[in-house]
Amino acid sequence: MKNGSIISIKNVTKRFPVGEGEFTALKNINLEFQSGEFAGLVGPSGSGKTTLLNIIGSLDSPTEGEALVLGKSISKLSHKESALLRNKHIGFIFQVYNLLPVYTVYENVEFALLLQNIPKVQRQKMVMEALDWVGLASMADKKPDKLSGGEGQRVAIARAIVKKPVIVIADEPSANLDAENTYAILKTMRELNKNLGTTFLFSTHDEKVMGHLDRIIHLRDGAVEEDEIINVKTLTK
Amino acid sequence: MKLAFQLAYKNLVGAGLRTWLNVGVLAFSFIIIIFYNGLIDGWNEQAKHDSIAWEYGNGQLLHADYDPFDPFTILDGHGVLENELSKNLAPILLRQASIYPEGRMFSVALKGIDVNQTTLKLPTASLKNSNAKIPAMMGINMADAANLKKGDEVLLRWRDQGGTFDAAKITVVDIFETNVPTVDMGQVWIPIRKMWEMTGLENHTTFYVANENFQPSNISGWKYQSQETLLSDLNEIIAMKKISGSIMYLLLLAIALLAIFDTQVLSVFRRQKEIGTYISLGMTRAQVVGLFTVEGSMYSIFAMILGSIVGIPLFAYLAKIGIGMPAASRDMGVPLAERIFPVFGIQLIVGTILLVVIASTIVSFLPARKIAKMNPVLALKGKLQ
Ligand SMILES: Nc1ncnc2c1ncn2[C@@H]1O[C@H](COP(=O)(O)OP(=O)(O)OP(=O)(O)O)[C@@H](O)[C@H]1O
Ligand SMILES: [Mg+2]
């Protein structure tokens, strides 16, 4: 692990069994991410964006090669170890939010902290702080079905960020949002990236999202086509 | 674990109607199981109590040749017991006889009993206080069957010691009500002294009924049967009843468990995204399996609460006022009172709770096991078959 490097993808290939044969979703990928990056995977549908993010998030493991996340080789982790890695250090944001419907906004955000056995008083402070970041402190007692799409995704962001993870993985976070909401959540995430130093990894088709990224990795047919460093320092509308 | 309970609670309450349907069926099973067993236990206690009071006393001392299950032994199965040994024992002499009410013939067991006995509830004082030549009494079912009333006279035919038939009119001086059919149906009770005269079997006894002061000892020519031995047949019949009844409520329980199983299978399938989300948030698969299992077994806990709310007042009421038994069910050869007071013991309640909780935990665990093999990526996509 190089200094500052928190994710290191080395010769990663991923194949899925399809019928009798196999489908190669990722072909010999090599990538390195530094702490505090705000980077995105971009590419046509089926290019392997989600597959790569899932491997980095330890939800899946490479068929060949090695994926090191925070110094840990994903394919060597036990169920328990990978659960611990996700619980402590990786936040997920999904296209469809995946909020737990029977819990309130507050409880959805609190969930990861419950798993970490954090005492109640501290939990309360952390949850309200996270809801403040996304501007939803007043909605703490609502159920997810009472929220708009933009609010729902902001709750998902709060849930991902409340435990102050090192990495947040956001797979097409704006796919179901309009321009205004997309801008709002990007602004929020950018602030968190700046203030907390959290690394954000996106996948997106969305031009509006691409415009805000520091780094764009173009994938095509499971291979890196181009690794573009843009280095936008400030977020503009 | 505490977390699993909190989450399961929220999920169940959040699931609404489906939860309450499952809980309702399960609570119903709870109540039926406890009710049925409570009824049988109550019957058991009442039947034992009545059998002791009317027939068995504190055990019986039988003539060695007499076998209560073999009517052919009645003829010779009797003898004389030394006086000092017969302390605390009420003698009964048994003979086969027939009565002829309205010209019809009824075979009866003619029982001579010590009119001064107080061991059994049989109202022998009525025999003692009567001036009739041969006073007799019988149970109400026998009286009904023979169409006899108090004060009626009826012809009795019996064999004396030598085997020759003899006949005389007896007077029905008392008709008693009892739940114990074996002292009622086909039985005519007369004073034992009278019977000695009638048969010439002076001082002979077929069996004695012991009172609580009786100390069993080995007496040659006689065999002692303790209260427990005498009650063992009754225990067997009641155990059989319990088993045959359990088929009914186990079916009911099976339906309730099937409903939980079904809900769980559906849950695991429909809530894939939720499962994937739990895993992405850092739960291990084992924890998610635990969560779903706890959720399923929590049905039984809810059912217990609901069952208690409905059941406790219901059972308390029934235990107090008893349950009326239809007359038709009363000639089963087992003592059965008109009203049975169910007995709801701790053992029954705790046992039922354990049965239901363990069974529902198992049927919840079986479908939830599938989660352990789930690919979280596919689960998140909701793409598992
Ligand atoms: N479990 C799987 N089994 C078989 N094939 C799979 C599986 N998961 C992904 N694939 C295939 O791998 C390829 C890459 O999929 P992936 O989801 O990573 O693409 P993507 O870039 O995220 O696409 P999109 O923009 O549509 O989300 C696709 O062709 C997909 O069909
Ligand atoms: Mg994708």
Image (cartoon, coloured by chain):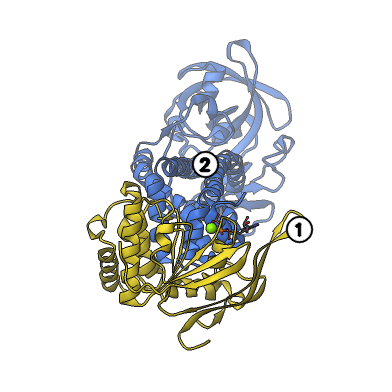
Chain colours: A yellow, B blue
The percent position of residue B38, horizontal first and vertical second, equals: 46, 44
Separation of marks 1 and 2 at Cα, in angstroms: 79 Å
State which quarter of the image contains the N terminus of chain B: bottom left
How far across and down, in percent of the image, does residue B102 sit? 58, 11
**Residue A21: numbered disc:** 1
**Mark 1 falls within which chain?**
A
Q: Which residue is mark 2?
A: B51
Q: In terms of depth relative to the viewer, which is nearer, B371 or B242?
A: B371
User: As shown in the figure, which amino acid type bears the numbered disc 2?
Assistant: Ser
Q: Secondary structure at mark 1?
A: strand
Relative to residue A165, is residue B75 drawn left or right?
right
Of B363 and B320, the residue lying toward us: B363
Instruction: Determine the residue positioned at 67% across, 40% down.
Output: B68
Say which residue appears at 47% left-offset and 43% top-offset.
Answer: B22
> How many marks overall?
2
Secondary structure category for the residue under label 2: helix
In the image, A126 versus B228, the foreground residue is A126
Give the quadrant of residue B206.
Answer: top right
Subunit under mark 2: B
Depicted B297 relative to depicted B281: above or below? above
Q: Residue furthest right?
A: A20
Q: Are marks 1 and 2 in contact (CB under 8 Å)?
A: no
Among all residues in the image, which is located at the extreme left?
A138
Q: Which amino acid does the dot numbered 1 rest on?
A: Gly
> In this view of the protein, can residue B351 be seen by the observer?
no
